[in-house]
Amino acid sequence: MEQTTDEKVKEAVREAYGDVARRFVEEPTAASCCETSEPASCCGPSEAPAEVTGSAARLYSTGELSDLPDSVTDIALGCGNPTAIADLKPGEVVVDLGSGGGIDCFLAAKKVGPEGRVIGLDMTTDMIKLARRNAKKVGATNVEFRYGEMEDMPLPDESVDVIISNCVINLSPDKDAVFREAYRVLRPGGRMTVSDIVVDGQVAQPIRDRLNAWAGCVAGALDESVYLGKIRSAGFEEVQVLSRKRASADQVSEAEAQLVLAGPECECGEQEAQALLSEAGVSLQDLAQKVASINVQARKPL
């Protein structure tokens, strides 16, 4: 098996999520006129779908999604809703790590208001392109999207009030660097509120060694105590788990197993996901009981 390195992991993740973004960037849709027409002609709330399904519907309220187009809601790939628990205030500067299509940025932008600012950071150029297009659609003038890696954020020291992230830090092969960088860019007293995936114990090595599994949610997930320990080691205080959600075995479908094991764009299908489970010596039911989605908050000391 090919050796898994940090750079290979990043490239696998970048490729998988780039494929997702390109579906929206390259496919000819009615939304494409937004780049050349006046916003009122095609980019208003009427572009939002009548019914939102999938992870967006599970994680966000109808009110939050009502004025967002499907190029935002259909690409909501997170495991939580960090803006709902971040207690954002008008005028704050917020950074979203792994901002994707921009859904959490746009929700945060409403909370911080025109006097605040939201920066979406993503390492996938196609995601940045899609998010910037989405920002034009929704008229989010206080949001910007920057290309960069969360292990080396292109931001000045002590320039941010709040950091949010939605099921992205688990994709990083160097979580210590992510939390150190988060600490660096936060102002004294600033806070970090993230949703992420953790596991009980260790992820089986055959899963962790599979590059395309890193684009899912499990291969890079840490034991919860280890995850929280890394946050504390970076210097954060008041580290607390605000909520913890675990799926019951009968709630996890074969398709969802494929998603968490092999990423959003894997063409291998459910058969390879099952083969990976077999190689790792765990059943789908065992995996469901091992994985949890948590919301975590921490604060940088004054």
Image (cartoon, grey):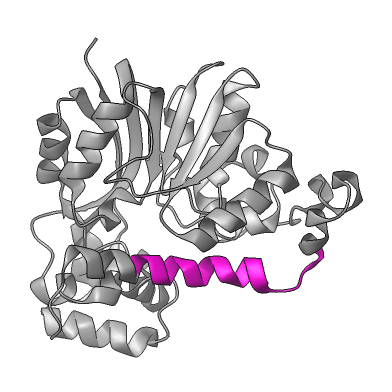
Marks counted in the figure total 0
Regarding residue 53, the answer to whether it shows in the image is yes
Q: Is residue 235 left or right of residue 88?
A: left
Q: Is residue 121 left or right of residue 292?
A: right
At 83% from the left and 50% from the top, the residue drawn is: 46
Regarding residue 219, the answer to whether it shows in the image is no
Q: Is residue 247 left or right of residue 84?
A: left
At 17% from the left and 34% from the top, the residue drawn is: 231
Image coordinates for residue 281, horizontal then vertical, percent: 10, 80
| Residue 15 within the magenta-colored segment of the rendering | yes
Of the pair 211 and 200, the residue shown nearer to us:
211
The span shown in magenta is 13-30
Please tell me whether residue 242 is drawn above or below residue 114 in the rendered image: below
Of the pair 145 and 282, the residue shown nearer to us:
145
Image coordinates for residue 55, horizontal then vertical, percent: 50, 57
Q: Is residue 218 left or right of residue 97?
A: left
The furthest residue to the right: 41
Of the pair 126 and 276, the residue shown nearer to us:
126
Instruction: Identify the image quadrant of the C terminus.
Output: top left
Secondary structure character of the magenta stretch overall:
helix
Please tell me whether residue 37 is drawn above or below residue 30 in the rendered image: above
Instruction: Identify the image quadrant of the N terminus.
Output: bottom left
At 80% from the left and 55% from the top, the residue drawn is: 34
**Which quadrant holds residue 256?**
bottom left
At 71% from the left and 52% from the top, the residue drawn is: 69
